[in-house]
Image (tube, grey):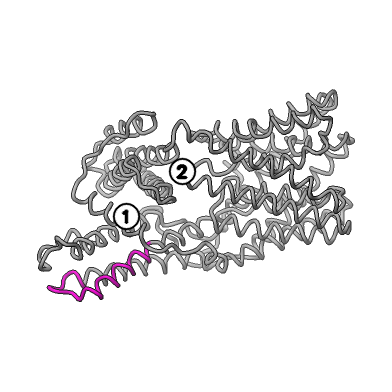
């Protein structure tokens, strides 16, 4: 099996590397989209407040402006819903934090509320797969707002500012759809084709074939997640689905695939011209028919994923609370910095959590030095302060894809400059507090990640794969009968479609959790592929032109 094969259960991730943690990677192919969106969404509100002489209110408009960072990889129909939920979540968290701040100034209470909010935000973002940037932005805004001086009468106006900026962010996020309505789906399909081409170039046996096979399986799975995230089925979407099926074929039979053809299709898909029409084989037609059946099956509500995410909630609440309390014990005036640092650490496994901690510390310490260099310019005028914030906002999103620490070099001065909107502070004090809180948050947050685990995350994928296999075998057995009972065949077909939906939801949930086994992307893709073909055979058998006997159903339709 490839590298996607899980390692034995219970194996603990002992290797915590130091080398390579800070190595720069290639930027995302759409790095400029969130970077430009961040600037376009933040500039009008901030410049308006500058013109009105009320830059002290910029923290509230920034809450809405930062919503523009989300959902850039989603199709526009799904993006519209996702961005609306992000705005509602951001505004709801801000409102709760401001009301709490107006009712109490007890720092222990504020840290406790902030930790509980961080846990809820983490779980909801993982359950709904909102991200990047996930829960960290929401936690930063709500935690900072807990420590903003506030009266109950000021809350409605401040929340209204966030709502207005959030609506503007929604418009900014949706605007590119006017020019390229299928842009996200095209990009996901192109990535799948390129990854499949890289694997086909190895012939399935050459150097690096295991790595390219795992990468191709992940890209194909991501493409299906994008294409099936909304129910709209246009001709363009169907053409893209056929291309993803061809990428799957290349994954299964690399030696029989022309990688140059896949790369040519990928280049054409990325453009603005018509989607290339891949010749539809019988296998491709069967799989697309199976995809239609999966889409028609009832979806498992995201709320059903909250139970399995309970360990993540406990870990986040505990780590954030202890980090905030430790900061208070050290006499730091802004313990929410330690809280946010802890919340930002938790990644797909313990090794990545460790790496994120190192990256966070290095990036923040470098960022406070950058802040010390630019703060005199920021104090020179309100316009300079606004422009610096916009520049760091752009830089953070442009560099984050290269490595988290590099993006943090811009995020840290941005966060410190936002504090300057309410009035000038002593730079040395801010730098010292931020550096100490970063170290405290990273240390305490990592300890919490080690202490609270979620060992059942991998088991759920295994169970979901087993359920799909059993459901497929049930349908296959009925199809081998000469005259299967129509009700039994329909029940089995629906059961298989439902199992496929549950598998996809389980993979989505587990991919946001740290566990000791890599995600079995290849097995998931193969299970989905064979299940789709079996679904297609069942649909043909049930249709008006269904074969009269089992001999008309080929073994190709039923193969695992």
Of the 4 image quadrants, the one containing the N terminus is: bottom left
Above/below status of 416 relative to 273: below
| Relative horizontal placement of residue 217, taking residue 411 as reference (left or right) | left
Observer able to see residue 374: no
On screen, residue 146 versus residue 197, left or right, reads right
Residue 205 falls in which quadrant of the image?
Answer: top left
Q: Nearer the viewer, residue 315 or 39?
A: 39
Badge 2 density bin: few <14, some 14–19, many ≥20, Cα 10 Å: many
Magenta segment includes 264: no
- Disc assigned to residue 249: none
Q: Secondary structure at mark 1?
A: helix
Residue for point 41% across, 57% down: 520
Q: Residue at x 74, y 45 (%)?
A: 160
Q: Which mark is residue 75?
A: 2
Residue at the spot x=31%, y=55% of the render? 292
Q: Where does label 1 land, which residue?
A: 291
Question: Quick check: can you spot residue 111?
Answer: yes
Question: Which type of secondary structure does the marked residue at label 2 adopt?
Answer: loop
Q: Residue at x 50, y 63 (%)?
A: 301
* Quarter of the figure that contains the C terminus: bottom left
Asked whether 496 falls inside the magenta stretch, the response is yes
């Amino acid at each position: 099996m490839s590298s996607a094969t899980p390692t034995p259960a219970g194996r603990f991730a002992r290797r915590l590397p130091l080398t390579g943690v800070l190595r720069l990677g290639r930027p995302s192919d759409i790095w400029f989209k969130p970077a430009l969106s961040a600037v376009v969404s933040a500039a009008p509100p901030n410049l308006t407040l500058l013109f009105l002489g009320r830059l002290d209110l910029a923290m509230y408009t920034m809450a809405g402006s930062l919503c523009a960072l989300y959902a850039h990889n989603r199709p526009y129909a799904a993006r519209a819903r996702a961005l609306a939920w992000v705005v509602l979540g951001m505004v709801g968290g801000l409102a709760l934090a401001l009301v709490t701040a107006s009712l109490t100034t007890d720092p222990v209470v504020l840290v406790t509320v902030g930790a509980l909010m961080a846990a809820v935000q983490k779980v909801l973002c993982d359950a709904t797969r909102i991200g990047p940037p996930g829960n960290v932005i929401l936690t930063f805004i709500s935690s900072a707002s807990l420590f903003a001086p506030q009266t109950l009468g000021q809350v409605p106006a401040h929340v209204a500012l966030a709502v207005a900026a959030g609506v503007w962010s929604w418009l900014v996020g949706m605007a590119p759809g006017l020019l390229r309505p299928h842009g996200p789906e095209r990009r996901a399909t192109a990535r799948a084709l390129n990854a499949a081409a890289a694997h086909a170039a190895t012939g399935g046996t050459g150097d690096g074939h295991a790595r390219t096979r795992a990468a191709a399986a992940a890209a194909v799975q991501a493409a299906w997640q994008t294409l099936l995230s909304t129910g709209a089925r246009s001709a363009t979407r169907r053409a893209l689905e056929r291309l993803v099926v061809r990428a799957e074929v290349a994954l299964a039979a690399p030696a029989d695939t022309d990688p140059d053809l896949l790369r040519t299709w990928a280049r054409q898909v990325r453009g603005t011209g018509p989607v290339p029409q891949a010749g539809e084989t019988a296998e491709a037609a069967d799989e697309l028919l199976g995809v239609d059946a999966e889409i028609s099956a009832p979806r498992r509500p995201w709320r059903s994923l909250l139970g399995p995410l309970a360990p993540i909630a406990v870990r986040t609440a505990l780590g954030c609370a202890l980090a905030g309390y430790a900061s208070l014990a050290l006499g730091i005036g802004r313990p929410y910095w330690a809280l946010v640092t802890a919340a930002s650490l938790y990644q797909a496994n313990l090794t990545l959590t460790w790496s994120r901690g190192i990256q966070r510390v290095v990036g923040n310490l470098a960022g406070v030095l950058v802040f010390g260099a630019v703060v005199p310019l920021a104090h020179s005028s309100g316009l300079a302060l606004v422009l610096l914030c916009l520049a760091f906002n752009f830089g953070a999103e442009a560099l984050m894809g290269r490595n988290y620490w590099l993006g943090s070099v811009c995020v840290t001065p941005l966060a410190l400059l936002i504090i300057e909107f309410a009035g000038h502070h002593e730079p040395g004090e801010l730098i010292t507090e931020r550096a100490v809180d970063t170290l405290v948050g990273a240390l305490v947050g990592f300890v919490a990640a080690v202490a609270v685990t979620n060992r059942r995350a991998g088991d759920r994928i295994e169970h979901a794969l087993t359920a799909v296999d059993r459901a497929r075998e049930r349908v296959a057995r009925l199809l081998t009968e000469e005259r299967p009972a129509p009700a039994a065949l329909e029940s089995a077909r629906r059961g298989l479609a439902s199992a496929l939906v549950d598998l996809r939801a389980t993979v989505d949930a587990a991919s946001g959790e740290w566990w000791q086994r890599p995600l079995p992307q290849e097995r998931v893709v193969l299970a989905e592929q064979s299940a789709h073909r079996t679904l297609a055979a069942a649909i043909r058998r049930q249709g008006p032109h269904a074969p009269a006997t089992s001999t008309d159903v080929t073994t190709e339709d039923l193969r695992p």
